[in-house]
Amino acid sequence: MNSSPRDGLAIYPGSFDPVTLGHEDIARRTLHLAGRLILAVAETATQSKAPLFTVEERLEVLNEVYDGDDRVECVSFSGLLMDFAREREAHFIIRGLRAVSDFEYEMQMAQMNRELWPEVETVFLTPDAPLSFLSASLVREVASLGGDVSSFVSPSVLTALERKLSA
Ligand code: PNS
C-alpha cells in the first residue's frame, strides 16, 4: 500500500520567541497534513533580531504548550535547517505565510533550502484570518511596554512573558 502524506514527518522551524497563537494555528493545520510534527527552534536565525527568550526558555514553553500531544516533538537545532531535515528524514518543511510582506523572505529561504537539499519541499500554510496580523516581534514589543497580549498567546507563554519581563 502507498504511504499517504498523513504518515509523513513535517518540520516547522522558527525562532518562536515566543510561540504565538499564529504559530499554534499553523502547527494545528500541519497536523491535518502530516502524522508527525517537529517544532524546531533554530539557534541561528536568518534575520537578526534581539531575542527576548533564550533558546532553552523557548523550548521549555513549547514543551508546556504541546505537553501530552504525542504527534508533536519540540526540539532546538544548530546549523542548517536542511542538515537537520536530512538527519531527521523529514518529508516537508512548514512555514506560515501571513501577508505579501512575508513572501520575499520566505521565497528566498525556500529556494536556498531547495538548493541545499532538494528532497524536502517547503509547504506554506496561511493562518486563520484574525491571526494574520500577529507576529512574535509585536507580541514581544507590546508585552514589554505593558500591553495585554493574553489573546495572542497561550497561558504558558503569558506566564513566561510575565516572569521574564518582571525579572
Ligand atoms: O521565525 P523565523 O525567525 O522567521 O525563522 C527563520 C528560520 C529559523 C526558519 C531560519 O532562520 C533558519 O532556517 N535558520 C537555520 C539556519 C539556516 O538553515 N539558514 C539558512 C536558511 S536558507
Image (spheres, rainbow, N blue to C red):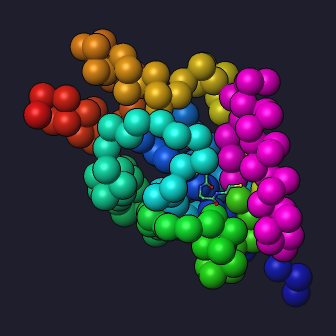
In this view, which residue lies farthest toward the front? 48
The tally of labels here is 0
Residue most toward the left?
167
Kindly identify the residue that appears in the image at 82 percent across and 79 percent down.
3
Looking at the figure, which quarter contains the N terminus? bottom right
Viewer can see residue 18: no
Residue 41, how many percent across, how many down? 48, 57
Q: Residue 104 colored magenta?
A: yes
On the rendered structure, is 57 left or right of 43? left
Question: Residue 44, position in %: x, y?
Answer: 51, 56
Query: In the image, 70: left or right of 155?
Result: right
The answer to whether residue 107 is above or below residue 133 is below
Main secondary-structure element of the magenta-colored stretch: helix
Task: Depth check: give the residue in front, 28 or 18.
Answer: 18
Image quadrant where residue 166 sits: top left
Work out which residue is located at the far bottom of the displayed protein and give it. Answer: 1
x, y (%) of residue 9? 67, 70
Left/right of residue 73 with respect to residue 97 in the rendered view = left
* Image: magenta residue range: 94-119
Q: Position of residue 84 (x, y in %)?
A: 61, 73
Foreground residue among 5 and 11 = 11
Q: Residue at x 38, y 40 (%)?
A: 51
